[in-house]
C-alpha cells in the first residue's frame, strides 16, 4: 500500500532513515550515492568524491563507462535473460575472451565471487572423487578471503568471519600464507586442492612470493592436487596482468573471478584448465549465471581493457600511486609499511585508526577503504590518471595531517 512517505519525490526522502527502517543491519553506512562518471561519484547532496574504492575493486572502467553502458542498453533491447537451457551469444563471447586471456581455460559463469569459489570447490571435490580416492580436503591460507557462503567462509582464513557460524562444512584447513613448507606439512591423503589468492586482497594487499607460487604449482603436480587461484579481487587487470598469477609464470588448474569482470554488473566466473575440466551435464548449474546482460557488460569490459591498453596503464599508474604513498610514509610516522602491485595498494598504520582516516578523507571528497582496523586500502579503477593520483594524495595528506 502506498503511504504518504512513498509518494514523496526522491529528493525529499530521508534515505538514511529509510535504510535503518527497511534494510537488515548488515552494513554500517551513511553516504547515499546517486550517480557516477569515470573516477568520480556524487552523493545525494551533490557532493563529489574521487573514488579509489571503485565498488570494492569492481568498477574497473570507472563509473558509467560508455562502452559498458552501450553494451547493456543494446543487449537489454534484444534479450535480457534466457536461462541456461539455451545458448546465449554474449555468454559464449565472454567465455571466448576469457579462454584467450587465461591460457585456454574454459568458463562457467555465476553471479558472484563466492559462488564462483563454490563452483571451484565442487569441481575440486569431483577431481578428488575421480582421480584421488575420494579426497576432498582443501588447504587455504591464513588472512585469505573467499566469500560469505558457508563453504567459502570455511575456506576463508580469518576467524572473525567464521566464529559465529560454527560448525562450518568439513574439509577445510588454513596454513600461513607464503609458507610452502606449511602447505606440504598440512597435505594428507585426504587433500585435493590448494586454494590461494596470488595477491591477498581483503587481507591487506599481500602479494605472494615467486618461489611460493611456483612451489605450490610444483607441489600440486607432484601430489596430484588441484591448484585453485582466487582472482575475484586481483583479477581483471588490477595488478597489471589480466590475472595476478600471470606475474608468477604458473598456470592454475582452476581460477575464479568476479568483481571487475563485467565492470560493475553482477557476475562470477570459474575457469578450468584441461586437467580439471571434468564437469558433466547435471554436475553444476545456475539460473542467472552467465545472464546475457552481465555477459554483454563483461565482453565490453574485457575488450576495453585490451583495446585501451589498460593493463600497461594500471602498471604505470600503480607505480606512480605507490611512489606517492611511499612519500606520505616518509612524512607520517603513523604509516609503518606500504605494499602493492598495480592498482592494488595498501599501507599499515601504527595504531588502529583506519576508520578515522577514511572519515577525514571522505570529508575532503576522497573515498578509500580499509583492510581491518589498521590498514588503508586503495583499489581504484584502471582508468585512473596521474592528475587523479595527485589529487588523491593531496587529500590523503590533509587527512593524515588532521589526525
Ligand atoms: C578474493 C575474494 N574472493 C571472493 C570474494 C567474494 O566475492 P563476492 O562478494 O562477489 O561473493 C571476495 C570479495 O571481496 C574476494 O576479495
Image (cartoon, helix red, strand yellow):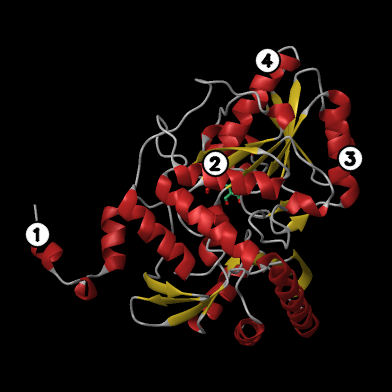
Numbered disc in front, either 1 or 3 = 3
Residue name at image x 68 percent, y 67 percent:
343
Q: Secondary structure at mark 3?
A: helix
Calculate the distance from the C-alpha at mark 3 to the C-alpha at mark 2. 26 Å
Between circles 2 and 4, the one closer to the viewer is: 4
Sequence-wise, which precedes: disc 2 or disc 4? 2
Spatial CA distance of label 2 from label 4 is: 23 Å
Whether residue 6 is situated above or below residue 128 in the rendered picture: below
49 up-or-down from 132: above or below: below
Determine which residue is flagged by label 1: 3
In the picture, the disc for residue 215 is 3
Q: Earlier in the sequence, mark 3 or mark 4?
A: 4
| Mark 1 crowd level (few <14, some 14–19, many ≥20, 10 Å Cα) | few
Q: CA distance from mark 1 to mark 3?
A: 63 Å
Residue under the image location 70 percent in, 72 percent down: 313
In the rendered structure, are the residues bearing label 2 and label 4 in contact, judged by CB atoms less than 8 Å apart? no
Q: CA distance from mark 3 to mark 4?
A: 25 Å
Expressed as whole percent of the image width and height from the top left, the position of residue 299 reads 53, 54
Task: Tell me if label 3 and label 2 are in contact, CB under 8 Å.
Answer: no
- The quadrant of the picture occupied by the C terminus is bottom right
Q: Which residue is mark 4?
A: 129
Would residue 234 be seen by someone viewing this image from the given angle? Answer: yes
First in residue order: circle 1 vs circle 2:
1
* Residue beneath disc 2: 114
Measured from the top left, where is residue 26 in percent x and y?
42, 51
Q: Position of residue 30 (x, y in %)?
A: 39, 68
Which residue is nearer to you in this view: 183 or 132? 132
Real-space Cα separation, disc 1 to disc 2, in angstroms: 38 Å
- Who comes first in sequence, dot 1 or dot 3? 1
Amino acid at each position: 500500500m502506498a503511504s504518504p512517505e512513498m509518494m514523496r519525490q526522491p529528493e525529499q526522502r530521508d534515505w538514511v532513515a529509510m535504510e535503518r527502517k527497511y534494510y537488515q543491519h548488515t552494513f554500517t553506512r551513511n553516504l547515499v550515492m546517486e550517480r557516477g562518471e569515470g573516477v568520480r561519484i556524487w552523493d545525494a547532496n551533490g557532493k563529489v568524491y574521487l573514488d579509489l574504492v571503485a565498488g570494492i575493486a569492481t568498477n574497473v572502467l570507472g563509473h558509467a563507462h560508455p562502452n559498458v553502458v552501450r553494451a547493456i542498453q543494446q543487449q537489454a533491447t534484444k534479450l535480457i535473460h534466457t536461462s541456461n537451457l539455451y545458448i546465449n551469444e554474449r555468454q559464449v563471447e565472454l567465455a571466448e575472451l576469457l579462454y584467450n586471456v587465461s591460457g585456454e581455460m574454459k568458463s562457467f559463469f555465476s553471479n558472484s565471487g563466492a559462488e564462483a569459489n563454490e563452483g571451484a570447490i565442487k569441481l575440486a571435490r569431483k577431481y578428488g572423487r575421480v582421480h584421488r580416492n575420494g579426497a576432498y580436503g582443501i588447504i587455504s591460507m591464513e588472512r585469505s578471503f573467499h566469500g560469505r557462503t558457508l563453504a567459502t567462509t570455511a575456506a576463508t582464513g580469518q576467524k572473525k568471519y567464521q566464529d559465529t557460524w560454527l560448525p562450518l562444512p568439513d574439509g577445510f584447513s588454513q596454513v600461513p600464507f607464503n609458507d610452502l613448507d606449511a602447505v606440504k606439512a598440512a597435505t594428507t591423503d585426504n587433500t585435493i586442492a590448494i586454494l590461494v589468492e596470488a595477491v591477498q586482497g581483503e587481507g591487506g594487499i599481500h602479494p605472494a612470493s615467486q618461489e611460493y607460487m611456483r612451489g605450490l604449482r610444483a607441489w600440486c603436480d607432484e601430489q596430484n592436487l588441484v591448484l585453485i587461484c582466487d582472482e575475484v579481487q586481483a583479477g581483471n587487470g588490477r595488478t597489471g596482468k589480466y590475472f595476478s598469477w600471470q606475474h608468477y609464470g604458473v598456470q592454475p588448474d582452476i581460477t575464479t573471478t568476479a568483481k571487475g569482470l563485467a565492470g560493475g554488473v553482477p557476475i562470477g566466473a570459474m575457469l578450468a584448465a584441461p586437467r580439471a575440466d571434468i564437469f558433466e551435464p547435471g554436475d553444476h548449474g545456475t539460473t542467472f549465471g552467465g545472464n546475457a546482460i552481465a555477459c554483454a557488460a563483461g565482453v565490453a569490459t574485457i575488450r576495453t581493457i585490451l583495446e585501451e591498453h589498460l593493463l600497461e596503464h594500471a602498471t604505470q599508474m600503480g607505480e606512480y600511486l605507490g611512489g606517492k604513498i611511499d612519500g606520505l610514509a616518509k612524512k607520517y610516522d603513523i604509516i609503518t609499511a606500504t605494499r602493492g602491485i598495480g592498482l592494488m595498494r595498501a599501507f599499515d598504520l601504527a595504531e588502529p585508526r583506519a576508520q578515522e582516516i577514511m572519515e577525514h578523507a571522505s570529508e575532503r571528497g576522497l573515498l578509500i577503504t580499509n583492510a581491518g582496523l589498521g590498514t588503508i586500502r586503495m583499489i581504484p579503477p584502471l582508468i585512473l590518471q596521474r592528475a587523479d593520483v595527485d589529487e588523491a594524495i593531496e587529500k590523503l595528506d590533509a587527512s593524515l595531517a588532521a589526525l
